[in-house]
Structures are given as structure tokens and as C-alpha cells.
Image (spheres, rainbow, N blue to C red):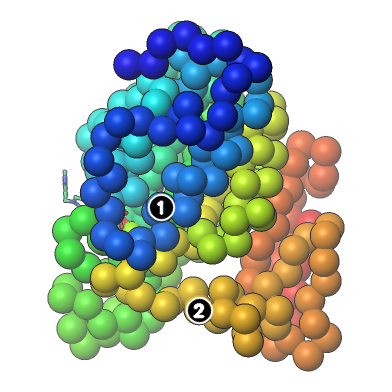
Amino acid sequence: MPTATSLQTLTAKDLASDQEVRWCPGCGDYSILAQMKKAMAPLGIAREKMVFISGIGCSSRFPYYMNTYGFHTIHGRAPTFATGLKASRPDLSVWVITGDGDGLSIGGNHLIHAIRRNIDLKIVLFNNEIYGLTKGQYSPTSRIGTRTKSSPLGSIDNPLHPLSLAIGAEATFVARTVDTDIHHLTAVLQRAAAHKGSAFIEVYQNCKIFNDGVFDYATDKGTKADNTLYLGTASRSSSASTVTRVFACTASTPRWCRWATASRSMTC
Ligand SMILES: Cc1ncc(C[n+]2csc(CCOP(=O)(O)OP(=O)(O)O)c2C)c(N)n1
Ligand code: SF4
Ligand SMILES: [Mg+2]
């Protein structure tokens, strides 16, 4: 349980709990945890006013590792607990931590309503395109052809794009970032924290054990520049044939974001 701290002295270290971190070596979750601590420490929010609420999954172990208040709840229901808390305690900074399975399979329905209600939750979806905790079944974001224990011949389902869902629910802030891009990840978390209204962030997260390398095209030195677009800060190479939708929209930008999949270009 956190004890009150002076805001002036809050550092990333202060936000680290005393719990042993139980993710696999090399898991992308470590980076997201590190950047969250870095992003939150300087914001002037007292530790006892921060709450992290998760469902079930590897990613959902996150609240144990933050020295703040938190709830490790039930599968797919973090948005529900978070909605209740934020509605009764609007003074708190309430973060939902979820995975592609937790947030888009069992919790898909709850997620869209949390987004559309726009009650100032910060929702971070760790997308590794797999069920990590249960040892590697395909998830709603797994690409067609993904071979797993539950799809031995390759997934035949069209994957969900989390940001499409969030925009469809009229999220007032959406962003996508990557676990290895630590500066972008930190900045996006801080932008979300500053947003008035619900913010939805998808983080591409590498599952070293069950889905290693699925985001290499967007993280490897040789291919990253051709596949990544930073809205407002950099432009893609003109030779790029595909664009990774890494972007942020806030209340001050147009509410509707569109992308044309035919040309793989995007406007906001
Ligand atoms: C009601 C219920 N159904 C199924 C499960 C099994 N289960 C636990 S975690 C999980 C999927 C987690 O996947 P994801 O949210 O992507 O998290 P990751 O482990 O990849 O971070 C499932 C199906 C459960 N715990 N409870
Ligand atoms: S199974 Fe995958 S997502 Fe889970 S801790 Fe290990 S590397 Fe991370
Ligand atoms: Mg997952």
C-alpha cells in the first residue's frame, strides 16, 4: 500500500513496488512497466491518487509492480471496476491495463462501453497478438495464418485492429506505440495522462516465448523507417510500401480519424 509522498521528490524508483517481477526474460512488458514509471513520476500526481486496474493475463500482473493503488480483477472486467472507481472518485488517475485477449475477447463488450462513456479512464492495451499467460493460443488480434496450439493449421479469422474498435466507439484519444520505442512510449503515456476524457493506447508488445518477432517489421533498424509513421513529428520514407499506424489523436484534433487501407495511407 502506498504511503503519501512529497510530489517534489517522486521519481520512477518511488513507483517501483517490492514485488518480484514474474515476466519471462526478454518480455516486452518490462519496457512498458519502466516507461510507465518514468512517465508518471514527474506529472505531479500523488502516488496515492494513482490506480492501476487490470484483468487477467501476463500483462494484467502490471498493478503488482507499481507502488500505487491497484486491483488485479477478473478476466475482461477491468473497465468495469475502473468505471465504478472513476465515477465515485473522479479525483483519481485511473488506468486500465489489459491484453489483446483480456480486452478484446472476453472483455470486448466492456471495453467499448468504457471508451464510449469517456469518463477519463486511461486504457493501455498490451497487444502481443497471443494469449501469453495460458501458453500461446491465438487471440482476436492474431494475423491470418498464425499457427498456435489452438490454431495448428493457422488462424482463419480476420484480426481485430484495436484502434479501429476504439475509434468506432468514438474514443476522444487514441494512440499506438511500441514497447521498444521508449521515448515515444513515454511521451504517449504522458499525453494520455494529460487528456481530459478516456484515452486508449495500443502498445505493440513482444511476447518472447509464444509470438516472438511479430512486430520486427516495425522495430528492426532495417525495416522500421519504412513501416512506421510518427504523426506530427516525422514523415515516412517515400519508398515505404506499408505504414504502421502509430499515431495519436486528441480532443484538439478532428474527432474522426480515417485511414485508407488501399493506399495504406492515413489522415487524421
Ligand atoms: C473466465 C476465464 N476464462 C478464461 C481464462 C483463461 N485465461 C487467462 S489469461 C487468458 C488470456 C490472456 O491473454 P491476454 O489478455 O492477451 O494477456 P497476455 O497474457 O498475452 O498478456 C485466458 C484465456 C480465465 N482466467 N478466466
Ligand atoms: S509468456 Fe509472453 S507475454 Fe507472458 S511473460 Fe512470457 S514473454 Fe511475456
Ligand atoms: Mg496477449
User: Which one is in front, 116 or 38?
Assistant: 38
| Number of other residues with Cα within 10 Å of mark 2, as a class: few under 14, some 14 to 19, many 20 or more | few
Location of the C terminus by quadrant is bottom right
Q: Earlier in the sequence, mark 1 or mark 2?
A: 1
The label shown at residue 30 is: 1
Q: Is residue 17 left or right of residue 36?
A: left
Q: Is residue 65 visible?
A: yes
Q: Is residue 79 above or below residue 150?
A: above
The residue sitting at 30% across, 31% down in the picture is 18
Dividing the image into four quarters, tell me where ligand 3 lies: bottom left
Q: Which residue is mark 2?
A: 216
Residue 227: x and y in percent read 66, 79
The three-letter code of the residue at mark 2 reads Asp
* Left or right position of 203 against 52: right
Q: Identify the element where label 1 is drawn.
A: helix
Specify the quadrant of the image occupied by residue 55. Answer: top left
* C-alpha distance separating marks 1 and 2: 17 Å
- Compared to residue 205, the image places residue 4 above or below, namely above
Residue 164 shows in the view: no
Q: Position of residue 175 (x, y in %)?
A: 63, 51
Task: Say whether residue 7 is left or right of residue 263.
Answer: left
Q: Is residue 98 above or below residue 163?
A: above
- Whole-percent x and y of residue 39? 60, 38
Q: Along the horizontal axis of the image, is 190 left or right of 144?
A: right
Q: Position of residue 200 (x, y in %)?
A: 56, 43
Amino acid type, residue under disc 1 in the picture: Tyr
Q: Nearer the viewer, residue 183 or 213?
A: 183
Q: Could you say whether the residue bearing mark 2 is in a helix, strand or loop?
A: helix
User: Observer-nearest residue: 142 or 212?
Assistant: 212
Q: Residue at x 51, y 12 (%)?
A: 5
Q: Nearer the viewer, mark 1 or mark 2?
A: 1
